[in-house]
Amino acid sequence: MQAHPTSVTEATRRGLSDEFPGWSIIRTTDTARWWAIREPKPGRRLGVVTEPAADTPEELAELLRGVRAVEGGR
């Protein structure tokens, strides 16, 4: 029996949230795109990207890994 698509999406979202703390991970239903959104914290220099978007969760993870690398592993 296959998992319901909503369950898979939620599990994927949780996995990305665990890997990238400080980011809110969403998937829009109208465009089926994945987004990562964060708010700047007081005193923290803004990073390179604050709202990356991708067509797949794998692409979003790669973008976030790139942001993390540029920002020095935060």
Image: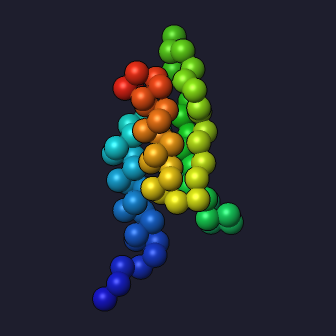
Residue sticking out furthest to the left = 1
72 versus 55 height, above or below: above
**Nearer to the camera, 60 or 51:** 60
Residue 18, x across and y down, in percent: 33, 45
Note whether residue 66 is visible: yes
Note whether residue 42 is visible: no
Q: Residue at x 59, y 33 (%)?
A: 50
**Image position of 29 (left or right of 4):** right
Q: Residue at x 50, y 53 (%)?
A: 59
**Nearer to the camera, 65 or 12:** 65
**Image position of 28 (left or right of 1):** right
Residue sticking out furthest to the bottom = 1
31 versus 41 height, above or below: below
Q: Residue at x 57, y 26 (%)?
A: 48
Quarter of the image containing the N terminus? Answer: bottom left
1 versus 6 height, above or below: below
Residue 46, x across and y down, in percent: 57, 20
